[in-house]
Amino acid sequence: MLKDAIILTKPRHHMVTRLWHWINALCLIVLLMSGLTIFNAHPRLYWGEYGANDDYAWMAVGSSQAMGYLRLGELRIETTGTLGNWQDSDGKTRTWAFPGWATIPSTYSLADGRRWHFFFAWIFSVGLALFMVASLWNRHIQRDLHMPREQWRPSNIWRSFRNHLDLRAIRQSAGEDYNSIQKLSYIGVTFILLPLMIFTGLAMSPGMDANWPFLTEILGGRQSARSLHFIAAFLLLLFFLVHIVMVLLSGPFRQTWSMISGGKKEGPAE
């Protein structure tokens, strides 16, 4: 029997995880920007089956030649220069909800926005399905995302949350196993938010609604599906921004190269 365990070096990120990470990042960026183009056609969100200009919208981006505003319920925030009323590169005032730099295409075209959105939605959906199957096969989910009982303790989750507010702890955590907050975040995004985006997207499709009306019935109507779709998109954007900040704080070059090359992780030989 060996007195000392043999230490082996293996990739921290499996090839399937790295490939899906970059494809998913591209898809989400294009889907978000093309989705904003589609939203510009009717920048209002409702609950229920129907929604039109005369109906009450729980969220709306208003616009005119004089001002722009964002309304959430009864709260109204002026957004002139940012949303609803902004100037393009030629200095001309535009009254689309979201400015051209945030949309695909940069000029308003509902037809082109839908083409971009639907094309990358298929890549995104197929990629997510293949990633889940491959992650079960190579045990990425069981190895990296499984939360043992002690990690579910409130004290452990609170400690992980505090570490995410400590710059020194963030820098020292690079290369370590995922903590409770990271696992909960990745589980929530991969198994809740991303499938919800696909499910609500299908529910909004007139063809799917005609053939499978139970999709919208489960969600409370097509307009409810649309609202949930945009709420999920906002949460994904929030996750993306926090993710980028954490990468920048913990060592952007090392972290990015690790997701390209696989990185290194030491462990005892079996």
Image (cartoon, grey):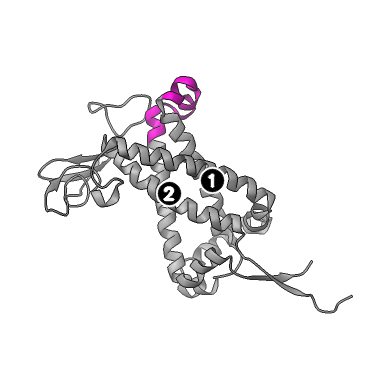
Residue 17: horizontal and vertical position, in percent? Answer: 58, 56
Q: In which quarter of the image is the N terminus?
A: bottom right
Picture disc at residue 140: none
Could you tell whether 138 is left or right of 235 in the image? right
Secondary structure state at the residue bearing disc 2: helix
Give the Cα distance between marks 2 and 1.
12 Å
Residue 168: horizontal and vertical position, in percent? Answer: 48, 75
Q: What stretch is highlighted in magenta?
A: 207-226
Residue 170: horizontal and vertical position, in percent? Answer: 50, 70
Q: Does the magenta stretch include residue 81?
A: no
The kind of residue tagged 1 is Gly
Q: Is residue 264 above or below residue 31?
A: below
Q: Nearer the viewer, residue 133 or 158?
A: 133
Residue 4's quadrant in the figure? bottom right
Q: Which residue is drawn at 29% across and 47% down?
A: 103
Say if residue 187 shows up in the picture: yes
Report which residue position mark 2 lands on: 28
Q: Residue at x 40, y 27 (%)?
A: 222
Picture disc at residue 127: 1
- Asked if labels 1 and 2 touch by Cβ distance under 8 angstroms, the answer is no
Q: Residue at x 56, y 50 (%)?
A: 187
Q: In this view, does 232 lie above or below 200?
A: below
Secondary structure state at the residue bearing disc 1: helix
Magenta residues, dominant SS class: helix
Furthest residue toward left: 66
